[in-house]
Amino acid sequence: MLRLSSVLALTLALSARAVWAADHLAEVRALYASAAYEDSLALLAKVDDPVQQDVADEYRALCLLALNREAAAEEAVAAWVRRRPQVPDDLANRPSKLVALYKKVRARLLPGLATSAYTAAKTTFEAGDFAASTRQFREALVLLRAADHERDETAPATDYETLATGFLSLAESRLAEARKAAVPKEPEVRVQPASLPSSLLAATAEAPPAARSTPATTQVARPPAGGPCPQRPKPM
């Protein structure tokens, strides 16, 4: 009962925290729209909900860019990229200065993020969690290919993509084997032959051997060799 109460209290606290953060972000948007950038930054410093951190860092970067504080804006975008290295689907809808800064920061951080993603996937694989490592290797490959695309021609190529591809194939194979072994086998059904009635079995067991043997064939007597053949009786 105590544990249930603790879980309920934690859930309510997290819900209240999320609502509080959402309300603050709504106020941040309004302040940003009215060009109150310093006030918006002050309010963003109070947002600590992990779910809302991407949005908070985005508005933090926007406010800093508007104040011509590009170095600080780059730090905000870097925190955003490290947390979510995948490019947002609607990035093109953001202001052009933010898009340019995002691409610049991501291109700089991507090689390290891709390598870290591969290392984490390999660690998970070695721990025997093939389901999680399969997902992680796929995500790592996306980052590795993107990093290779963004790579400067003067930068040395890496073999991480080849390694990640091989480990992904191996993880998928191990996962398929594990799932196959986890499927319960159907019990083997053996058909027993029909048993004879006990009275018939008892009668068969008590009968003499002659009674159970097949009838002997009738032997016809043959005359001795060289002897006269038996004559047939003449008709009357």
Image (cartoon, grey):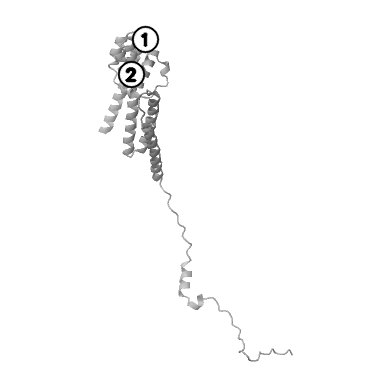
Does the image show residue 52? no
Residue that appears at 39% across and 37% down: 166
Residue 210 drawn above or below residue 79? below
Residue that appears at 38% across and 16% down: 100
Tell me the SS state at disc 2: helix
User: Tags 1 and 2 in contact by the CB under 8 Å rule?
Assistant: no
Q: Residue 77 carries which label?
A: 2
Q: Which marked residue is nearer to the observer: mark 1 or mark 2?
A: 2
Badge 2 crowding class, 10 Å Cα cut-off, few under 14, some 14 to 19, many 20 or more, is: many
Closest to the observer, 54 or 24 = 54
Question: In whole angstroms, how far apart are the C-alphas of marks 1 and 2?
Answer: 20 Å
Q: Residue 5 carries which label?
A: none
Q: Which of marks 1 and 2 is nearer the N terminus?
A: 1
The picture places residue 223, in percent across and down from the top left corner, at 62, 88
Q: Residue 33 carries which label?
A: 1
Quarter residue 170 falls in:
top left
Residue that appears at 46% across and 71% down: 202
